[in-house]
Amino acid sequence: MRIVLIGPPGAGKGTQARMLQEHFGIPQIPTGDLLREAIKAGTSLGKQAQTYMDTGKLVPDQLVTAMVAERLERPDCEPGFLLDGFPRTIAQAEALSLHLDKTGQQIDCALSLAVPNLALIERLGGRWVCHNCNAMYHERFSPPQHPGQCDKCAGELYQRSDDTRETIIARLDVYERSTAPLIDFYEKNGCLRTVDGIGEPAEIFQRITDTLSAS
Ligand code: AMP
C-alpha cells in the first residue's frame, strides 16, 4: 500500500500517519521530521532548509524531492510506504510519479484530511512535541500527564519554532496556494479520498481505515 497524506498544518497528519504505520506495517516518511533532524545534525540539507522552515515557507522542491527519493530506495519501502507532508506542490507530485513509474509503482491512495482553518490555528498554537519520539500533545485537548514530559518515553517536550501565530498564518497561506491544488491533481488521478479530520484521533483513524477498505 502506497499512501500520501495531504492536509494543512495541524490537520493531524503526523498522528494518523503513526497509527497507520502500525496498522499496515509500512514505514511513515514524515518530511518535516526528516528536515528537522537534518537541521539538528547540521547537515548541508539542514542548513539550506532552516531559513525556509523558520519562516513557514516551503523548502525548494529539488532538495525535498531528492531527500524523499533516497528514502524510498531503502528496502523497508518495498511493501509500501506512507508519505506524511510530501508532496506539497504539484512539481513534487509529478517528480514522485516519475520516480515510482521507473519501478512500475504508483500511489494507491491520496488521503486528504479536511479541517477548517480556525481549528488548525487553535491546534497548532497549543502543540507540544517530544524531542525524543516526536509524540504530540496539546496543552488543552491532550495534555501530557506531567507538564513538559512525554507520557510515552519521558522525553522533554518542546514547542516547534514554526508554531508561532505569525508563522502558522504564513504556513496556512502556503498550504492554500501551493499544496491545496494537489487535491485536484489526485482527484484527476482517481486516487483521492477525503476524510473529515475533526474529532478524536481514534475516531478519525476509524474513518480512514473505513475509507481505505471501501476503496
Ligand atoms: P511539517 O512538519 O510537515 O509541518 O513541515 C514543517 C516544515 O518543513 C514546512 O513548513 C516546510 O518548511 C518544510 N517541509 C516539510 N515537508 C516539505 C515538503 N514536502 N516540501 C517543502 N517543504 C517541506
Image (tube, grey):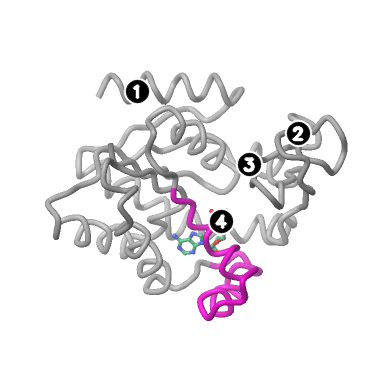
Rounded to the nearest angstrom, the CA distance separating label 4 from label 2 is: 20 Å
Q: Nearer the viewer, mark 1 or mark 2?
A: 2
Rounded to the nearest angstrom, the CA distance separating label 3 from label 2 is: 24 Å
Q: Quadrant of residue 122?
A: top right
Left or right placement of residue 56 versus residue 153 in this view: left
Q: Residue at x 45, y 59 (%)?
A: 177
Secondary structure beneath dot 2 equals loop
Q: Quadrant of the C terminus?
A: top left
Comes first in the chain, label 4 or label 2:
4
Query: CB of mark 4 within 8 Å of CB of mark 2?
Result: no
Taking the magenta stretch, the answer to whether it contains residue 36 is yes
77 or 197, which is in the foreground? 77
- Amino acid type at circle 3 is Leu
Q: Quadrant of the N terminus?
A: top left
Comes first in the chain, label 1 or label 2:
2
186 lies above or below 144: below
Q: Residue at x 56, y 56 (%)?
A: 33
Q: Nearer the viewer, mark 4 or mark 3?
A: 4
Rounded to the nearest angstrom, the CA distance separating label 4 from label 3 is: 19 Å
**Location of mark 3 (residue):** 120
Q: Ligand 1 closer than 8 Å to the CB at disc 4?
A: yes
Within 10 angstroms of label 3, few (less than 14), some, or many (20 or more) residues? some
84 or 198, which is in the foreground? 84
Q: Nearer the viewer, mark 1 or mark 3?
A: 1
**Location of mark 4 (residue):** 33
63 or 190, which is in the foreground? 63
130 lies above or below 144: below
**Location of mark 2 (residue):** 151
Q: Which residues are magenta?
A: 29-57
Q: Residue at x 65, y 56 (%)?
A: 169
- Amino acid type at circle 4 is Asp
Q: Which mark identifies residue 5?
A: none
